[in-house]
Image (spheres, rainbow, N blue to C red):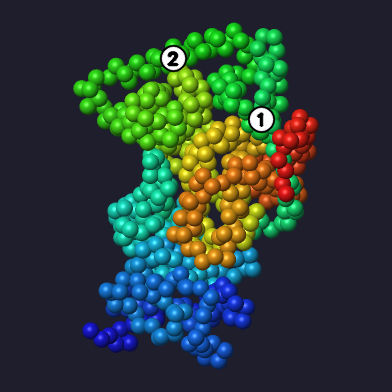
Amino acid sequence: MEQNIEDYKLIFEKEGVYLHTNAKRSNQDTTIPGSSVLWRGPVAPAVLYTKKDGEGAEEDANYDPGYEPDWAVISTVKKDREHVPVKDSGQWSFSLPLSELYSLRRARFSLGRNFLVLTSRGGHPLPPLHFHRGGTRELFRAMNRYIILDQSPVDGRLFLAYPHDPGALSQSFEKLQLFDDGSDLVSRFIQDPWHYDLQGQPPIPVLPMIPIFHPSPDEEPGFELINCGVELGPRPDVTRGRPLDKWDEFLDPEGRVKNPERIKEIVFRGGVTPSLRKEVWKFLLGFYPWNSTYKERENILRVKTDEYFRMKVQWKSVSEEQEMRNSLLKGYRSLIERDVSRTDRNNTFFSGNDNPGLTLLNDVLMTYCMFNFDLGYVQGMSDLLSPLLFVTQNEVESFWCLTGFMELLHQNFEESQEAMKQQLLQLSILLKALDPELCDFLDSQDSGSLCFCFRWLLIWFKREFSFEDILTMWEVLWTRLPCDNFHLLIACSILQSQRGELIGSDHDFNTILKHINELTMKLDLQTVLRGAEAIYLQLTQCKELPVKVQQVMGLYVASSSEEDSPDSQASETLRLLAESQAGAASCDSAYVPTYP
């Protein structure tokens, strides 16, 4: 049926809205002027963008932007629905009904110009709309008349769109059917982030993005400038050292470790030689105190062994009939059995059928449920245990090492996932300080929340590196040097190593996610660790480091005294690192790789 123009009402219109095309050839314009419009039609309100006609804005019929526009499909969203008629201005026009809007990202470049990125419910981002003359606030308010825009708890600039239905807000993503197309990459990632490159491994839970903020029509959502506002200075070269290959010389006659800090410095610089890991790991993970004697360690092992088997008997003695009435324990057992059968099966310690290593993996995880029944078992814990069991070759010792490891990571597995959300926010803070341009690009492609880093942080890169590499990385991280959040600097090092592949390319959200997933087993550990430490040194040497960055790195202390100031804290850490690096270099220069 043909519709009359009288059926449409103009709600909002703004000139001076531009598309930035990133055209590859210098003789082509990289900005396309136009206007953004919100119409209310007989079917549904819709957002439109139209290229400006007139002098200096005529579109050449042979115009080639230098690449295939990523948003070409957006102009045909839900073809079976009737859209507000749009004046044909060529490929640089599009429309999207508000009923098809999934999310809206609202941010600002360092020059102060605002931009919006709208994403359809099919997971396709529209081209960023750059408001050179302002107007995002008014468009935001106008849209709020027809839909609810809820701020994501993970990213303050991301707003999720819902209809004005109070019941819908309490539903999950699946119930809201935000991803209608089951074949969509984003939908499959939300369901199982391991599907493409890790099909033999148990899945990892994915961060839910539950809206918790309801912006008022009269309230302007805040902006955050995507730069740290200071010059960081050059990034220093960093060398790695030899692994810890001597142990007895660090012990006194009664078995106490004489210099634990020196041990940690050597381990941070080069890891631990494989023959010593079984002993050193038990100190790094708190099974043995650093000041314990040989005799005290014998007593600790005896007591801990008794305690372990008492907990193991608790679940072993549960009959099938009892378990039928304990759905929680039954659920833990089922989940553990399924995950154990898929954990590190390429490693000889866990390969083959009826492997005793698999039985140990199962029993230790079940016993951990008795030790921490509130947390129980969550997918991903089997990934943490398998290297511990491989190194210790002992059921009891691997269990208590796991409890020490979980002291560091247990919050990652809590149902609220507040710790994971916080870490993603902290990673974003660091990356903005280090590389505003990369952040701008990720924001423009609806990837600024860094959700693709979720599995990195959850299990400390376990599936990004080879099994042997992860043994080295974890023992480096267990030293807690040079700061507690060194794993976030490792993530920054990886992301910055990929900036050349990402910036200037035609990647969108889907292909960015795919590219990051495909980095698995392709990263060089020593290069990543050198990059992460160099980032730490670069940031700590900055005299005007933003307070938020200092807080993430553990450098900020709210004290007026010189002794407790951030500068003195950073200087002391730098001194220790310098001494450690010099000591490693003096041992054997052949073992100390350097940057080119």
Q: Position of residue 460 (x, y in %)?
A: 52, 39
| Viewer-nearest residue: 381 or 511 | 511
Q: Is residue 210 visible?
A: no
Question: Image check: 74 left or right of 472?
Answer: left
Name the amino acid, label 2: Glu
Residue at 50%, 46% (x, y): give it.
520
> What secondary structure is marked by label 1?
loop
Q: Earlier in the sequence, mark 1 or mark 2?
A: 1
Mark 2 lies on residue = 307
Label 2 crowd (10 A; few <14 / some 14-19 / many >=20): few
> Whole-percent x and y of residue 306?
44, 11
Q: Quadrant of residue 413?
A: top left
Q: In the drawing, does residue 83 fall left or right of residue 560?
A: left
Q: Is residue 86 visible?
A: yes
Specify the quadrant that holds the N terminus. Answer: bottom left
Question: Comparing marks 1 and 2, which lies closer to the viewer?
Answer: 1
Q: Position of residue 319 (x, y in %)?
A: 24, 19
- Residue 462 spot, x, y in % from top left: 50, 39
Disc tally is 2
Instruction: Note whether 537 is above or below 3 in the view shown.
Output: above
Q: Residue at x 44, y 27 (%)?
A: 349
Q: Which residue is mark 1?
A: 243
Question: What label does residue 558 carry, if any?
Answer: none
The amino acid type of the residue labelled 1 equals Pro
Instruction: Mark 1: give few (<14), some (14-19) or many (20+) Cα within 10 Å.
Output: some
